[in-house]
Amino acid sequence: MTFGVSKNPEGLYPLDNCSFIKKASGQPEAFYFEKVKGGERKYYHIDRPIREKILPEVLSEEEVSQILKSTTNLKHKAILMTIYSAGLRISELINLKIKDIDSERIQIRVESAKSNKDRYTLLSPKTLEVLRAYVKKERPYHFLFEGFGSTKETPIVYGKRSVQNILKSAVEKVGIKKKVTVHT
């Protein structure tokens, strides 16, 4: 990170898209020395500490099946099964549309996934059965999983925190002590 202020004919402009005030207030001595006293500009290179790479907690097959069995709400079960079996991110799941499920080829089309790339992922036959029962019961309009108050005219995306809370309550119900997130 470079600290300092560049000078051009129109006036003073900050470097690195930081505000002039932040730079001036962050290092008042440097500002005084450089701008008031006319001293040379100094740059300070500060290395960031390297993050430790920690392996995530992995659930066993038995733990995953316990979580899915403990979920009684059909919509919640469909959400957890779709994320787990297809390996989706939360943002990919909540943006799935009904047309993205290809039941003939047993695939899910994920549009604008990470780095805005489209991709196909597998859909398990068990998940397809649960999704069919869910769609038959809930009748979503636009998105596969719609938020509360969604209508045909104004579809509402299901909330990310809601998906996280579904998993959290299922894990607590089963009694798993590991630190579990939607992506583990």
Image: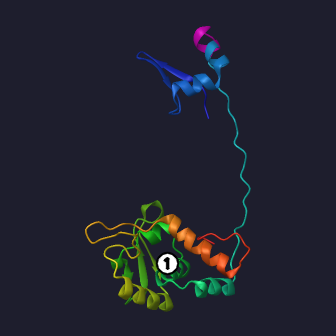
| Position in image of residue 157 (x %, y %) | 39, 67
Report if residue 166 lies within the magenta region: no
Q: Quick one: quadrant of the N terminus?
A: top right
Q: Amino acid at mark 1?
A: Ile
Q: Is residue 5 left or right of residue 184?
A: left
Closer to the camera, 184 or 165? Answer: 165
Find residue 155 and report its image quarter. bottom left
Report if residue 39 lies within the magenta region: yes
Furthest toward the top, the residue is 37
Q: Bounds of the magenta span?
A: 33-40
User: In the image, what residue occupies the spot 51% across and 68% down?
Assistant: 162
User: In the image, what residue occupies the spot 67% across and 28% down?
Assistant: 44
Mark 1 surroundings within 10 Å by alpha-carbon count, few (fewer than 14), some (14 through 19), many (20 or more): many
Q: Looking at the picture, does residue 179 appear above or below residue 135?
A: above
User: In the image, what residue occupies the spot 59% across and 22% down?
Assistant: 24
Q: Looking at the picture, does residue 43 appear above or below residue 46?
A: above
| Position in image of residue 53 (x %, y %) | 72, 59
* Residue position marked by numbered label 1 in the rendering: 79
Furthest toward the left, the residue is 153
